[in-house]
Every structure is written in C-alpha cells, then in structure tokens.
Amino acid sequence: MQIFDGIITDRGSKYAVSGGPCSSAEEARAFIKELTRQKKFAKATHNTWAFLGDDGPVKNDDGESGAGMVIVRMLEREGLTGHIIVVTRWYGGKHLGGDRFRHVQDAVRHYLDHAFAG
C-alpha cells in the first residue's frame, strides 16, 4: 500500500491518494479496511475508490457522487488493471462544485506519476 497524503488543499478540503494491488471486490474491501485502520482515514468524509478487474470496473463513490467513475476512466486510459486507487477527501466546510472532479483527477494523476516512478 502506497499513500500520498496532503497532496491537494482547496477551501479547507484536503485530499490524499493511495493504492495497491487488487483484483476483486473482496480484496478492495480488505484494502479499504486496512487503510481505515489509520484513524485519520477512518475519519475522512469520503474514501472513493476503483479498480479494473477481469470482469470489468468496480467502484465505490462513498458519497462523492460520480467520483468513482472518474477514477475508472483514468485507470482505463492507463490500461492499469489489478490495482486499486483510493482518493480520500476530508471535507473543509465549503462546497467545491465541479472542482471536486478536477481534484479527484489530479489526485489519481499524482498517484500514477509517483507510485510507478523509478
């Protein structure tokens, strides 16, 4: 599991992105369970995630409507299968509107650029 914390801050909301190998919904649940063992992530407003498995995409918006599909599309574009990406948001008190989707994209891009570097 790789975690990149504090990568985006906007109007009080803070974002982190994490990920690791994953090939089933069961493994995804286990990944989220492991991530939320850290109190900080357990207290997050949203832990939105997605992965591409053998049977297609699996996603969970965790209340951040539409965000899981943003992650799915980026995974499809990268051709990255068998790997979960989780975008975590701590709500800062102000609605971000459409900017929240840009932040999800930026968080996934950060993960893709840094998790596989080197």
Image (cartoon, helix red, strand yellow):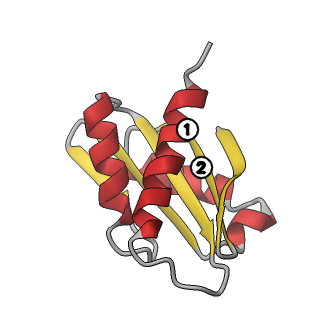
User: In the image, what residue occupies the spot 36% across and 60% down?
Assistant: 68
Q: Secondary structure at mark 1?
A: helix
Amino acid marked by disc 2:
Val
Tell me the number on the disc at residue 111. 1
Indicate the quadrant where residue 46 lies.
Answer: bottom right
Query: Residue 32, percent across and down?
Result: 57, 57
Labels 1 and 2: the sequence-earlier one: 2
- Name the quarter where the C terminus is drawn: top right
43 or 67: nearer the viewer:
67
Q: Secondary structure at mark 2?
A: strand
Q: Quick one: label 2, few (<14), some, or many (20+) residues within 10 Å? A: many
Residue 72, placed above or below residue 39: above
In space, the residues marked 1 and 2 are separated at their CA atoms by 6 Å
Residue 51, placed above or below residue 115: below
User: In the image, what residue occupies the spot 43% across and 74% down?
Assistant: 64
Residue 19, placed above or below residue 16: above
Marks 1/2 in contact by CB < 8 Å: the verdict is: yes
With 55 as the anchor, is 32 left or right in this view? Answer: right
Residue 98, placed above or below residue 27: below
Query: Residue 45, percent across and down?
Result: 61, 76
With 31 as the anchor, is 9 left or right in this view? Answer: right
User: In the image, what residue occupies the spot 43% across and 51% down?
Assistant: 105
Tell me the number on the disc at residue 17. 2
81 or 109: nearer the viewer:
109
50 or 109: nearer the viewer:
109
- Name the quarter where the N terminus is drawn: top right
Indicate the quadrant where residue 79 lies.
Answer: top left
Amino acid marked by disc 1:
Tyr
Quick check: can you spot residue 3?
yes
Query: Residue 3, percent across and down?
Result: 68, 43
